[in-house]
Image (cartoon, coloured by chain):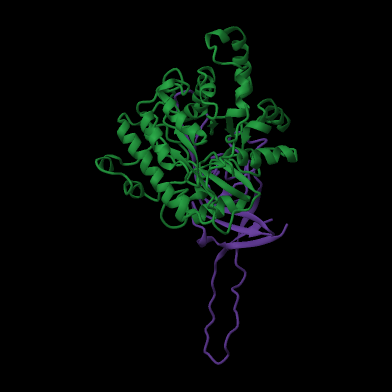
Chain colours: A purple, B green
Amino acid sequence: MAKHVVGTVAEIPPGQRKIVEVDGISIGVFNVGGAFHALRNRCPHQGAPLCRGSVKGTALPSAPGEYVWARDGEILRCPWHGWEFDLLTGRSIFNPHRVRVKAYEVSVEAATQTEAGEVDPRVDTYPVTVEADQVVLHV
Amino acid sequence: MTLSLANEARPTTETSPARPRTGIIDCDVHPGPKSNAEIKEHLPQPFRDRWNGGGRGFFGNPVHGARLDAVPPGDGGPGTDPDFLRRQLLDEFGIAHAILLPRAFCNLHPDPDLGTAVAAAYNDWLAETWLDKYNPDGAFKGSITVAHQDPPAAAREIERWAGHPHFVQVMTDSGARAPFGQRQYYPIYEACARHNLPFAIHPGTDGMGINVQPSPGYPTHYIEWHTGLSLAFQAHLISLLTEGVFEKFPNFRVVLVEGGTAWLPGLMWRLDAEWKALRSEVPWVKRRPSEYLKDHVRLTSQPVEQPDDDRKLLQMLELMDAENLLMFSSDYPHWDFDSPTHALPKLPDALHRRIFETNARAWYGL
């Protein structure tokens, strides 16, 4: 499994997402309440760009006439036909065992060092350290 | 009886670059005005001030009504930007022609003059924009919206556009006060037949405004209402067949758009069986009712009713005579869009070509 740096933690605040392409595969990386999750950006139904869907909660199974709203921010809904997927697992809500989208492992790792880049030796420079946690996708 | 499907008298003014002669024909695409002002511009007073757009008012989709990725950059909602629509639909899937069905919802108004005026304004707008300014290659073909509340006025509206190179059919909502086989509608059908324009029925305004809801009372939820949209189509088709509309107007043709398809075989078996005993009640029905379909009726595919097993869907297509009756439609940009590459399983080449292209080409003379 190869590691791919998606960006910095600050770049994807809670509730936000970043869609990246890794080895020709489009993947959505989501910050769900501070934890990162990644799903393939392709709905198993008709191939829609799943990760461009809305992120909300859902009404859990309940008794007739009862509404139990829960899991705010954890449910991704396909932008075409509205199928719901669990952002934490990639499993669909209506048939978690058979209808699912691939989920990828994501970790947050401290940036080892900042790329220095080319420095013009004629200009006075000062050492700058940027400490930024990076979001790393394991594909 | 043989029908000439292509209107040979219809002028062809497709300008270069011409659309490719092969490619999918998408029989249900929804363009919309960028704002109500685009329609109001074509509405004379007193209707300009009286009309403020609006659709159903209730039974709104609780999730989203249109594909979220169909919102074009800049202003305007889904289906309002021709360049974006061309990229996302025509270019993406190799679609040669999109049959456009705007959603005027004019059939719900109690005032027939308002309904007629709104229909005319939508037709003026469509002709000026999607069928002209946005249509250098002739990819877009349009539908003449009519308000069936006033059939003679609707017939005059059809006359106003007959011969236009890019209007290829007349359209109405499925919402109505009476089933479409009844004789009050005949001025519309006479005009359609005279100009060889199919009459397309599209879901909408059922149970809204003056129209009856084709179920025992109002359902509670959108999911019930939306699943039940096919009920009106079945009632309209039974009515058209048993009232003898296709005997009275031998050139009259009907397209059932987005009304479902899998119900067709069972309904026809039932109607054919009844006819054996009851034909004397409707003696003008001279053939088994199902035998009128091939000459007079087409169905569009979306939403494809999908069993878990693709083989059963192939059987359904055979049972409904899809080879002759079915025309592909996507319903772009609505939420229940059917992708040309995913909505149907792999089909035999000949059947694929008929459903995705040649049935519609023959039907619309494209």
Task: Say which of A111 and B316 sits in front.
Answer: B316
Residue B272: x, y in percent? 62, 15
User: Which residue does the image show at 40% across and 26% down from the upper left?
Assistant: B207
Question: Toward which corner of the image does residue A90 lie, by quadrant?
Answer: top right
Looking at the image, is B211 positioned above or below residue B63? above
Looking at the image, is B166 positioned above or below residue B303? below
Q: Is residue A137 left or right of residue B30?
A: right
Task: Say which of B363 and B344 sits in front.
Answer: B363
Question: Toward which corner of the image does residue B17 lie, by quadrant?
Answer: bottom right
Residue B144: x, y in percent? 45, 39
User: Which residue does the image show at 43% across and 57% down from the upper left?
Assistant: B74
Q: Is residue A108 left or right of residue B50?
A: right
Please give the count of numbered marks on the rendered protein: 0
Residue ranking furthest to the right: B348
- The quadrant of the picture occupied by the C terminus of chain A is bottom right
Looking at the image, is B16 positioned above or below residue A57? below
Can residue A135 be seen from the camera position used here?
yes
User: Which residue does the image show at 62% across and 69% down from the upper left?
Assistant: A112
Task: Say which of B302 and A51 sits in front.
Answer: B302
Residue B79: x, y in percent? 47, 48
User: Which residue does the image show at 37% across and 41% down from the upper left?
Assistant: B120
Residue A3: x, y in percent? 68, 61
Can residue A40 be seen from the camera position used here?
no
Task: Say which of A80 and B229 sits in front.
Answer: B229
- The quadrant of the picture occupied by the N terminus of chain A is bottom right
Looking at the image, is A108 positioned above or below residue B364? below
Question: Toward which corner of the image does residue A45 lie, by quadrant?
Answer: top right
